[in-house]
Image (tube, grey):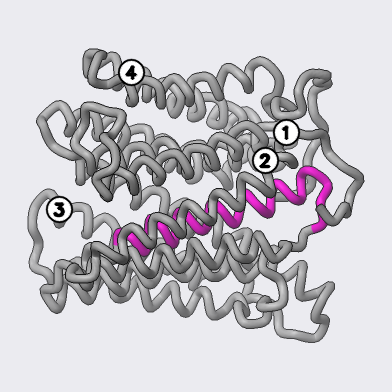
């Protein structure tokens, strides 16, 4: 994201002055709340606050609760930079956050509400977000980002499909994996811009003379197309089983291609700055997920195939959103673009959570230990985020370059 554009005058609470503020805060709270309840449920300490199958509640509230709030915070901050138009603030921003909260309340009360009412309540927020951001991109003639808005629209479709699957007494695995695929494509598309861009800017200042990341070109376009093709095959395979070699080889090819893409961005040159190496690390989980999925299909190892889901969700989606939320919060509230030790610890905790959760899929005999440990590490990571970044999100911008 570039420098923050001009804003509408707003004299109310700072949290409603810019889109990243309420939605990054809500994302952090949702991340802690969801995993706290989920971990307690897995340990037999509590029931889930919904009338859905446990796996469906877990997937919905992370994909369409946590991740959608993080995505909203990013888009409501990035789109004004892309288009040069005024950002959403004040009461309209509060109203959009209210729609997100309405969805969470509807899911929690799903045992007492008709299923169609719950579905409508949860779909109002993504529909409003699509209309608001889509309008700005179209009116601003920002054609470069039409694919981003298209993927936001596909996420809305996946959430609708989720409720349709639920209505058939299914835990909605197909819709959930479709949503994961769309989030991964957003990471590959947007991450493919910001990771090398931020790395280039930092290297020029901190390490002049070090080779810079390769610019976006034909190779990057090819890797994006290959990833989309592989994700489509993996999704089709869930609907109509394909010969394992077809999605398996495509996934392996996509994983290897994106490992090469990441290597071209000079990840090892960023080890001195956590705000940068975490972006590279989060991106790494995407090709690792492809490689696990491909190997799982080709070797007929369902545990490895399941591990790919957790590498993508906890590592790819979870860590990339945490990385973007911390960086954007620091930059847009006037803080120095340097991660303190606590923030770096949060990154490492979440990366470890991804590896342990994936490991539990491969080693089911150790799942009783690895799964709760992964949950606690997730909780630690987002608790650190809330403790360190909620005050920044709730208070006015400080003078540029402030250390904390």
Q: Is residue 256 magenta?
A: no
10 Å crowding of disc 4: few (<14), some (14-19), many (20+): some
Structural distance between the alpha carbons of marks 1 and 4: 30 Å
Secondary structure under tag 4 reads helix
Q: Earlier in the sequence, mark 2 or mark 3?
A: 3
Identify residue for label 3: 238
Q: Are marks 4 and 3 in contact (CB under 8 Å)?
A: no
Which of the pair 140/55 is nearer the observer?
55
- Mark-to-mark CA distance, 2 and 3: 40 Å
The location of residue 316, given as percent across then percent down, is 44, 60
- Whole-Å distance between the Cαs marked 4 and 3? 26 Å
Q: Secondary structure at mark 3?
A: helix
What residue appears at the point 35 percent right and 20 percent down from the top-left corner? 106
Task: Give the CA separation, mark 2 to mark 4.
Answer: 30 Å
Q: Residue furthest right?
A: 399
202 relative to 33, above or below: below
Number of marks in picture:
4
1 or 4: tag closer to the N-terminus: 4
Q: Is residue 316 magenta?
A: yes
Q: Which mark is residue 120?
A: 4
């Amino acid at each position: 994201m570039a420098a923050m554009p001009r804003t509408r005058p707003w004299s109310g609470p700072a949290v409603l002055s810019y889109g990243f503020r309420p939605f990054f805060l809500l994302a952090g709270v949702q991340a802690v709340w969801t995993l706290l309840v989920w971990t307690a449920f897995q340990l037999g300490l509590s029931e889930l606050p919904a009338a859905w199958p446990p796996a469906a509640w877990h997937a919905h509230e992370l994909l369409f609760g946590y991740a959608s709030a993080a995505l909203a915070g990013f888009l409501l901050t990035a789109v004004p930079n892309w288009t040069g138009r005024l950002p959403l603030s004040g009461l309209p921003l509060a109203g959009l956050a209210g729609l997100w909260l309405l969805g969470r309340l509807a899911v929690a009360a799903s045992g007492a509400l008709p299923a169609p009412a719950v579905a409508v309540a949860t779909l109002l927020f993504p529909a409003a977000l699509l209309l608001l951001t889509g309008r700005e991109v179209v009116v601003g003639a920002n054609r470069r980002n039409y694919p981003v808005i298209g993927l936001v629209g596909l996420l809305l479709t996946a959430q609708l499909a989720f409720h349709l699957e639920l209505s058939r007494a299914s835990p909605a695995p197909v819709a959930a994996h479709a949503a994961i695929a769309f989030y991964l494509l957003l990471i590959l598309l947007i991450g493919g811009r910001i990771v090398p861009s931020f790395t280039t800017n930092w290297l020029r200042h901190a390490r002049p003379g070090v080779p810079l990341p390769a610019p976006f070109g034909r190779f990057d376009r090819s890797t994006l197309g290959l990833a989309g093709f592989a994700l489509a095959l993996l999704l089709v395979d869930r609907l109509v089983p394909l010969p394992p070699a077809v999605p398996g080889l495509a996934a392996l090819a996509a994983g290897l291609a994106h490992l090469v893409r990441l290597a071209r961005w000079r990840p090892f040159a960023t080890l001195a700055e956590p705000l940068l190496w975490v972006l590279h690390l989060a991106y790494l989980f995407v090709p690792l997920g492809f490689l696990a999925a491909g190997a799982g299909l080709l070797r007929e190892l369902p545990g490895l195939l399941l591990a790919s889901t957790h590498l993508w969700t906890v590592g790819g989606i979870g860590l990339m959103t945490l990385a973007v939320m911390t960086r954007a919060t620091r930059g847009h509230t006037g803080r120095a673009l340097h991660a303190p030790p606590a923030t770096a610890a949060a990154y490492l905790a979440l990366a470890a959570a991804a590896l342990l959760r994936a490991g539990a899929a491969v080693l089911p005999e150790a799942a009783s230990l690895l799964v709760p440990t992964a949950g606690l590490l997730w909780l630690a990571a987002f608790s650190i985020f809330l403790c360190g970044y909620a005050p920044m999100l709730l208070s006015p911008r400080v003078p540029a370059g402030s250390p904390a």
